[in-house]
Amino acid sequence: MPATVDLGISGLEVRTGDHICAFYRGAERDDILVPFLEAGLRTGDKCICVLDTARPASLPALLDDPQVQERLERHQLEFIDFESSYLASGRFVPDRMLEFWEHNIQSALEGGEYRMVRSAGETHWALRDMPGVDQLVAYESELNRFIPRYPQVILCLYEIERFSGELILDMLKTHPKVLLGAMVFDNPYYVEPDEFLALRQ
Amino acid sequence: VRTTTPAKLDGENLELRTQLSNLQGLLVLAMLMTESGDEGQILRLATSSVGGLARSRPEGVYLTGEGWRWTAGSCLQETGRRAVERQLAGLGSLGGAVEVPGRSWGWAYPLRSLAGGVGFLLVSAEEAPIPAEQFLLRVMAQQAGMALANARLHAQEHATAEGLSDEQAALRRVATLVARGEPPSAVFAAVAEEVGRLLLADFTFIGRSDPDGTITNVGGWNRTGNPIEVATRYSTSGQNVTTLVLETGRPARIDSYANASGAAAAAARTWGAHSAAGAPITVEGRLWGLMTVASGGEEPLPVGTEERLAGFTELVGTAIANAQARMELRGFAEEQAALRRVATLVARAAPPEEVFAAVTAEVGRVLSTDVAGMSRYDPDGAATVVGAWTSTGAALPVPGSTRLSPGGRNVTTLVFETGRPARIDDYADASGPAADLAREEGLRASVGVPITVEGRLWGVVMVSSRRAPLPADTEARLAGFTELVGTALANTEAQAALSASRARIVATADLTRRRIERDLHDGAQQRLVSLALQLRAAQAAVPPELEEFQAELDRVAAGLTGVQDELREIARGIHPAVLAEGGLGPALRALARRCSVPVQLQVGMEGRLPERVEVAAYYVVAEALTNVAKHAGASVVQVEVDAEDGLVRVGVRDDGVGGADPTRGSGLVGLKDRVEASGGTLRVESRLGQGTRLLVELPIDAGQPPDST
């Protein structure tokens, strides 16, 4: 049975295996990301955060905490930049990214130290003119097949003011849950990957 | 592990699910657009979602009153755009099909709120989208329209709130200045700037409406920061904001100076103003002036500008009223102080010249005039200037030397003729010698108030201005001073009369004494001498054996001589002949010799003094020595007499018991009267156990007290 997961944000809860799309405006990112990671550290989850930069200087509220520093040192919390993940080969290849997650999550759970992994990914890289970024929607849909295989929660961060209406519509179709304005919606019209990918053919 | 809904991949089901998903997405999108509240964001989300909702592309957004915002992907050329615009103009607010060059399908979706259309979203496609997709586009456009309308409403509210709070802050700052009692000039400058900045004007102007129908610029502001020239005067005529406001007493505006006329319009044009708004400034219910703002922009000032101005003119009115009240209060206090100073002079019987000079100066200062003066009337109405003052300290006719003949229409003559206050508001209409003098001095207006002394018209106090007519209350304020002048003059006249009468009494007494002395000398003394001679002759005829009789006759003769001596002493006390013959020195030496207390006499002068002075000095010493002999118990008396600087000083000092009271005993009182009748002063120092010192000063030639008339 899927267990309840504390999202850390104004008492919101999700379930293991949830793939959540978080829409935010500018400075709201840290209001979502920091509590989400803090809740993970508190409950002893492995936390993986893929940011636009490996030096998350933009998270001072989190990193000033000496306890968080200690968690970083023993790799409970990991920051990974997009160049060594999403665009590791200089282009975006959905299968490689899925392998990246598979590898990281497996190794996190192997030692038995963590019972769950919570991941957060920033998506500004998709706005770059790089080969393969048009595969983002297909990748997001594929993630829905990957997620149930491990005890995990994935939070995808989309800055409303920078992504197009079309992409937002696609994200609504590929994420079963949406976090918007301190609310989590169950997305009843989420389209399963089989359907979605078939439609895109 | 998530359990997914088993999906039947048949076309109908998939289509329905996709449609529902899109609708769900649209709702979220609508929420995002509404939440953003930013027009740019809303349009960006709307246009960028078009491709996701239907196989189509957005061409652009046409906003009513603003025009096109073309989408990056639009292939429309300039001519195509104009063709589309023409079609849009023909469409109703609900939009519809549009021919887009190079595309087989085009549609203008209305962006509208319940209140009306905001614009259109133009979408084109290679092929017409299926109805379900067109429905999605329509819903999306509707949602975007609502969001836009909301955003505009919000922006408007925000601007209003911000504008209001700016206005409140500006009003508060000005109100603080007013409450602090800043002078009106400071308030004018601050208000002009606050208003100019707040109402986005290029110029602000605060004008005072003057009684002559002109308007005077008393403060202003200019966006360029150049100072506005203050104190410029304009006539109020023609068609412009100034005349509109002053005529109606209400806010007014003018959207273009093209058809404006008059001096104010001409000035506005030189500043480069295109439109202006003004509001009246009323002070305690009276129209005082106005404040105007002007803009050099092509667009007229926003609607409501004149009403917003009114909030500030109210504060300006309050500031002016406050300042006026303060000035009145301060003026009143100054006037009281000035009157008190003059009254003090009067009370200590200062010489009239001093009073006149003080009165003209105080009057000039208190009434803030340029010139103040005082003249005395001769019986024929000619006026002699007795006091003059100017605000600049510049020289004026020397008091006493200028005599103005009566005649013509001028304040001096009017006051003489009517005995009442008079005024001239413009010397251009005046005549006569006094008016000529006023014009020579560059005066424009005068007010004069009569000075009456015990019911008689004595003279006139006048104030004059070089610029404008004097305020209406000038007469009343001057009257306070003329009353004091009248009192001062009455006092000095009474004082002079009293002194004269005392002098006359003393002189009469002196004359009487001299006559008695002469009578005694010529009559009684001579007869006594002849009686004594007859007695001696008779004695010689008496036989020597009648010793008893001889002795009796001797006693009679001795008694006769004693009577003679006594009579001589009496005569000397009344008016010593030695004084008349030998002067003060010998007379005092004779007094010293006869005094029962040893006298050290020192007379430090030679020659004779006026008889009046010698007599007075002699009596002082005689009376003082009598007192010393009778009461002091002294062992020695020092008498010093000296003449210097037109004064005779007489000092008598003993080493007796002291404690003499000059107010008691007729001796000292009589002496004081006599000394003061001669215009002199007497001082007694007599502390108990420290002897008595009498000091008298007598003027040698100031026989009469100053004559005021």
Image: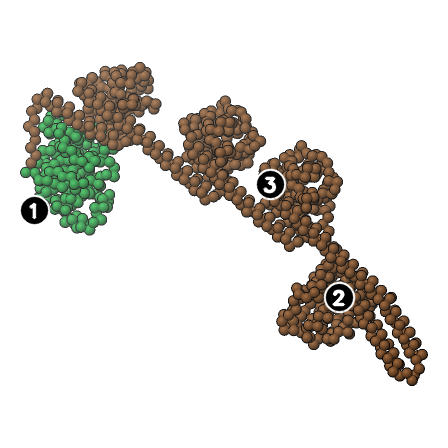
Q: Give the Cα distance between marks 1 and 3.
A: 108 Å
- Which residue is found at the position 77% from the left and 62% from the top? B613
Disc assigned to residue A111: 1
Question: In the shown orientation, is residue B421 left or right of residue A192?
Answer: right
Asked where in the image residue B93 lies, by quadrant, the reply is: top left
- Which residue is found at the position 81% from the left and 68% from the top? B571
Give the crowd class for mark 1: few <14, some 14-19, many >=20 residues within 10 Å: few
Q: Which residue is mark 2?
A: B619
Residue B570 horizontal/vertical position (percent): 80, 69
| Label 2 SS | helix
Q: Is residue B442 above or below residue B539?
A: above
Front tag of 3 and 2: 2
- Which residue is found at the position 76% from the left and 66% from the top? B618
Q: Which chain is brown?
A: B
Front tag of 1 and 3: 3
Residue A158 horizontal/vertical position (percent): 20, 35
Q: Give the Cα distance between marks 2 and 1.
A: 140 Å
Give yes or no for contact between labels 1 and 3 (Cβ–Cβ under 8 Å): no
Give yes or no for contact between labels 2 and 1 (Cβ–Cβ under 8 Å): no
Chain where mark 1 sits: A
Chain A shade in the render: green
Q: Amino acid at mark 1?
A: Gly
